Amino acid sequence: MADPLTALDATFLELEQMDEGATMHIGGVMVFDPPPDGTVPTLEAMCANIASRLTLLPRYSQRLSSERTGGLAWPRWQTDPQFDIRNHVHRAALPAPGGDAELCEWAGDFFSHRLDRTRPLWEMALVEGLEHGRWALASKTHHCLVDGVGSVGVAQLLLDAEPSPSPRAFAKPAAEEPGSLWRALIPRPPDAIADLARTGARAASAGAHAALHPRETLEKSRSLAELIVRDEVIAAPHASLNVPIGATRRFEIVRASLPEVKAIGHELGGSVNDVVLAACTAGLRSLLISRGEQLPAEGLRAMVPMNVRAGSEQLALGNRVSSLFVELPVAEPDASARLRKIAEHTSRLKSSNAGLGTSTMIDVAALAPPLLHTLIARSLYATRLFNLTITNVPGPRIPLYAFGAALREIHPIVPLAAEHAVGIAIFSFNEGIVLGLGADCDSTPDLHVLAEGVEQGFVELETLIRAKAPKPPAKRRSSKRKPSPSSSDGTPTAGARRA
């Protein structure tokens, strides 16, 4: 029996259907060092390597039963009889010199194109021509197939934990689940009837659960009411970030050091996520100022997805997310105050179960039949709720490899819904953080201003903690002058510059 999409998974298909400019795929560009032999893998070798591992991810060879949502039944995942991995993995080459500028320009074009709904909803590209002999593997997967955290597990499956791993056997999962023979003996109702029955069963189950767990129901109701008042009655401010968009994208990256970001949070107060949000706020402030735009006193509102995926669901596809709506104080000129306000705000949101309110709204929306769910999906991603999405996905803390080449970094991308011209994705790997800034090409020709502002935001915070660092005690003077141990001629050497 083919698996139907969940209501949340279907939301991302509906958002694309409602606006030609919306692109609902997630993904990134994985940049690798040169392989040991200095030769970039061939397209044939890459296809064979990926195909051998996709046996653990059968949905990557499945397509939707219907290209569109709506009507009485959700689309279902069904095996694609014409699946050919060569339709999903391609080769590309950068022009010289193959630096960040060339790679970001290529990535912007790669992420501009929607995935073909008549095929399994993913695509990869083997990118050659990067400077210093490096190469890249770019990927995009539709959000209805997997969320950001789930994609990390998929990426780890496709990579190796050592340069020369032992051959692994990727066995196919069992074709039938326990009890499938019994189910096969029972006549299957038409999809529409089955989905209506399933919706009714969910509603009945929700009602029974509410009756049996009144305290939990009250807490969910309170959280939902707070969410509606805070994020609907008090709408997000109007900003030039929220205009009609096309499907063509610009892409920029900003790098940061994970140990330095942790040190900032330790010294000034706040989590890693708070520090990165503060740097993003500095960038957004610079962007609005450069446009001559009045800075909203209440701040811009960011939707920050929150992982609710259990540890046992690492390779589970589909979406397991909720959201927090965080006010970004772009009108605050002081970097320290910006971080403090963000840390205080996120702390209040977490303690108030704000994420529970969003989850409850999603659960309520799931009770609606597909015909009505499209209208609810539009309201869940309206500009009235938030100005932009900022998603932070923690990546692996161990080195990873492909074809013996070390993975250096990952440049992430976040989907853009209708009238949301800018989105920021954050991905940490090993000791580095990369922020991927995606934007609508026509309405955001000044994306570089945002990137430079985010970089400056990190610099301002690093300067603050350096100023707080205790100065070393002055050495007692000796009557005898001694040459510096760092120089043979007695001239002190300069301190090392920060990378």
Image: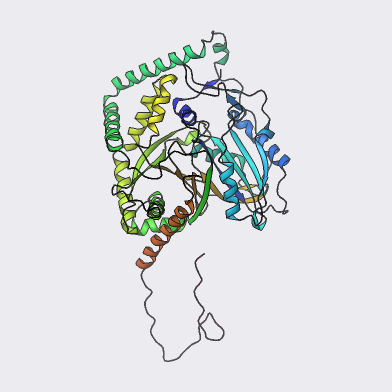
Using residue 22 as the reference point, say whether residue 163 is left or right of it. Answer: right
Residue 389 percent location from the top left of the image: 42, 42
Residue 198 percent location from the top left of the image: 44, 16
Task: Name above or below for residue 301 compared with residue 134.
Answer: above
Q: Nearer the viewer, residue 442 or 170?
A: 442
Task: Name above or below for residue 419 compared with residue 34.
Answer: above
Is residue 399 in sight in this rendering?
no
Residue 179 percent location from the top left of the image: 54, 16
Q: Nearer the viewer, residue 10 or 239?
A: 239
Task: Name above or below for residue 174 compared with residue 385.
Answer: above
Would you identify the image quadrant in which residue 159 lies? top right
Quarter of the image that includes the N terminus:
top right
Q: How is the image coloured?
A: rainbow
Would you identify the image quadrant in which residue 392 lies? top left
Is residue 178 in sight in this rendering?
yes
Using residue 80 as the reference point, say whether residue 419 is left or right of it. Answer: left
Using residue 42 as the reference point, say whether residue 408 is left or right of it. Answer: left
Q: How many marks?
A: 0
Residue 443 percent location from the top left of the image: 46, 45
Q: Nearer the viewer, residue 358 or 201?
A: 358
Task: Name above or below for residue 134 compared with residue 313.
Answer: below
**Which residue lies at the image location 30% right of the left edge and 56% below the top edge?**
337
Using residue 441 as the reference point, say whether residue 61 is left or right of it. Answer: right
Would you identify the image quadrant in which residue 360 lies? top left
